[in-house]
């Protein structure tokens, strides 16, 4: 029997997400997931869904600020 992927009835449109790797002095910022029972206690990078017309780096900065209160700068090495 073949497994098929199901689309959530809550959000049937495809979305694009961004996650930001936030570092300071070789330390990485992780946040604890708390929204769903299945993911409680799991750790994740700050991030979220890209809003229509938004650039991914802006999404990363916005989501990091919303989730942590921190203002971050994007550094491209």
Image (tube, rainbow, N blue to C red):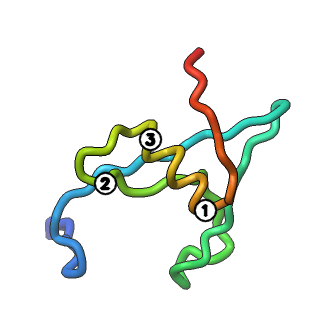
Query: Marks 3 and 1, how far apart in space?
Result: 14 Å
Point 81% across, 39% down: residue: 27
What x and y, as percent, mark residue 2? 15, 65
- Is disc 2 placed on a helix, strand or loop? loop
What x and y, as percent, mark residue 45? 60, 51
What x and y, as percent, mark residue 67? 60, 62
Mark closest to the chain's N terminus, 3 or 1 = 3
Q: Nearer the viewer, residue 26 or 62?
A: 62
Split into 4 quadrants, where in the image is the N terminus?
bottom left
Q: Is 20 left or right of 14, judged from the image as shown?
A: right
Point 68% across, 73% down: residue: 41
- Is disc 1 placed on a helix, strand or loop? helix
Split into 4 quadrants, where in the image is the C terminus?
top right
Q: Which residue is mark 1?
A: 67
- Is disc 3 placed on a helix, strand or loop? helix
Point 58% across, 52% down: residue: 64
Q: Which residue is mark 2?
A: 51
Mark closest to the chain's N terminus, 2 or 1 = 2
Q: Is residue 62 above or below residue 5?
A: above
Q: Residues within 10 Å of mark 2 (few under 14, many from 20)?
A: few
Mark closest to the chain's N terminus, 3 or 2 = 2
Query: Marks 3 and 2, how far apart in space?
Result: 10 Å
Most extreme residue toward the top is 77
Q: Is 22 left or right of 76, judged from the image as shown?
A: right
Q: Nearer the viewer, residue 11 or 58?
A: 58
Q: Residues within 10 Å of mark 3 (few under 14, many from 20)?
A: some
- Residue 58, which numbered label? 3
Most extreme residue toward the bottom is 37
Point 39% across, 39% down: residue: 56
Q: Quadrant of residue 25?
A: top right
């Amino acid at each position: 029997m073949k497994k098929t992927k199901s689309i959530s009835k809550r959000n049937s449109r495809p979305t694009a997400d961004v996650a930001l790797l936030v570092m300071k002095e070789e330390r990485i910022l992780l946040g604890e997931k708390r929204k769903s029972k299945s993911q409680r206690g799991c750790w994740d990078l700050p991030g979220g869904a890209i809003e229509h017309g938004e650039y991914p780096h802006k999404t990363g900065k916005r989501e990091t600020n919303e989730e942590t209160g921190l203002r971050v700068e994007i550094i491209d090495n």
